[in-house]
Image (spheres, grey):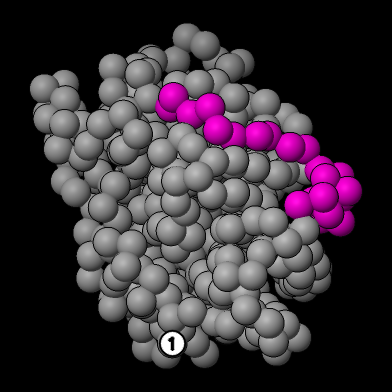
Amino acid sequence: MHPKALLDLAATLLREVLKLDTPADMVVSSFFRKNKALGPRERATLAETAYAVLRERTLLQNLAQSGSGPLERRLAILAWGGNAGFLRGALSEAEQAWLDSTQAIDRHSLPEAQRHNLPEWLAQPLQATLGDEFWALAGSLNQSAPLDLRVNTLKTNREAVQAALQAAGIESAPTPYSPWGLRLVGKPAVNKLDVFTRGDVEVQDEGSQLLALLTEAKRGEMVVDFCAGAGGKTLALGAMMRNTGRLYAFDVSGHRLDALKPRMARSGLSNYYPTQIAHERDDRVKRLTGKIDRVLVDAPCSGLGTLRRNPDLKWRQTPKAVAELQDKQTAILNSAARLVKSGGRLVYATCSLLRDENEAIADAFSASHPDFVPLPALDVLQHAGVARADDLVQGNTLRLWPHRHATDGFFAAVWTRK
């Protein structure tokens, strides 16, 4: 495709993405379906450009004010995610001179809002939590996340998968904490590889793997993934259980549960029971009261720990929406707790960076449920075979930060019932 045509497409895509009324990944996917003639490199350039604008929207919109022409075109030029030489072929002399001048600006001299590229309602609590370390977090959130795989230990081991990837020309390294994980070099397409199609691996961030490990699910137990979603942690739990016992996958979305079925078949798991519920008080939940060995509650949350993958979330979320989520998180955790039998384990987790969705919810639960005893996350992680577990904890809880751990941002608290 001619450079000018690709730049025009990038501007068109940005016009849709910046409406911020639909998740960016859905907008990009829809755009590609409408433009089926695009090749892999062209798609990569367009996607990277769109996500770069979302990551640094405050900065780029400020820089774009000095240019001329449609705003989306200026933003695409500033955030171009493809070959720089290719871009030059699309620019006029004036546009190239303008781009050169903006790239020469010392970004450290800019106002804080243009350096961290976060809405103020989010920046303030993160600065209060992290102090000077906030700037390392802000920088990491403007980077792309690595691609992690979880090895399906029901079928194979990490060494065998790494060798198979090497044979396919894909470099990988063991994840630093999870005993199941491999981190790939770059973003190779893995969904057509033999190790993927036969169920030896699943794409899963290392942080999500650690949440499953906190349950220490065992053979023959009854386990509930209370908010199963796409099912990544359900798959991990089933492998931990060695395909024995009963694994319930609860979710309010039947569509998500249906999408889980082919993944389960590929993984070789047959001990799971997908169950659509209307809400956390559904009768299907009540029937299991006091019977479950392990309950994982990966609660609906703001998703702000995933900003490296979903940078549009910081512009689409609002303080009001986060406050409403806290009520939902409390209700779900209280309902899920009823399932846990005496001596059983409860894990509450989110992929949020905010204390209001994390420590505040866990502390309130502990205060109102004296029959649940907090377990030190360090002890649980070490017992589960997690390397360098002391790097991952804050007090009694798991706290993962993108800039410290190269994972998505996660929180988890663990209890046992008396």
Determine the secondary structure under disc 1: loop
Residue 104 is left or right of residue 10, and the answer is left
Q: Residue at x 43, y 58 (%)?
A: 216
Q: Quadrant of the C terminus?
A: bottom right
Q: Could one spot residue 35 in this view of the protein?
A: yes
Q: Position of residue 122 (x, y in %)?
A: 60, 75
- 192 lies above or below 312: above
Q: Is residue 273 magenta?
A: yes
- Viewer-nearest residue: 380 or 25: 380
Q: Residue at x 52, y 90 (%)?
A: 128
Q: Quadrant of the N terminus?
A: top left
Quadrant in which residue 154 is drawn: top left
**Residue corresponding to mark 1:** 395
Residue 254 is left or right of residue 343, and the answer is right
Q: Position of residue 287 (x, y in %)?
A: 82, 50
Write the start and end of the magenta stretch as one range: 267-288
- Viewer-nearest residue: 331 or 62: 331
Q: Residue at x 65, y 42 (%)?
A: 248
Residue type at numbered disc 1: Gly
Q: Could one spot residue 24 in this view of the protein?
A: no
Q: Residue at x 25, y 44 (%)?
A: 182
- 344 lies above or below 32: below
Quadrant in which residue 300 is drawn: bottom right
Check disc 1: other Cα within 10 Å, few if <14, some if 14-19, many if 20+: few
- Viewer-nearest residue: 98 or 115: 115
Quadrant in which residue 45 is drawn: top left
Q: Position of residue 91 (x, y in %)?
A: 37, 34
Q: Position of residue 221 (x, y in %)?
A: 54, 49
Residue 389 is left or right of residue 355, and the answer is left
Q: Is residue 281 magenta?
A: yes
- 136 lies above or below 11: below
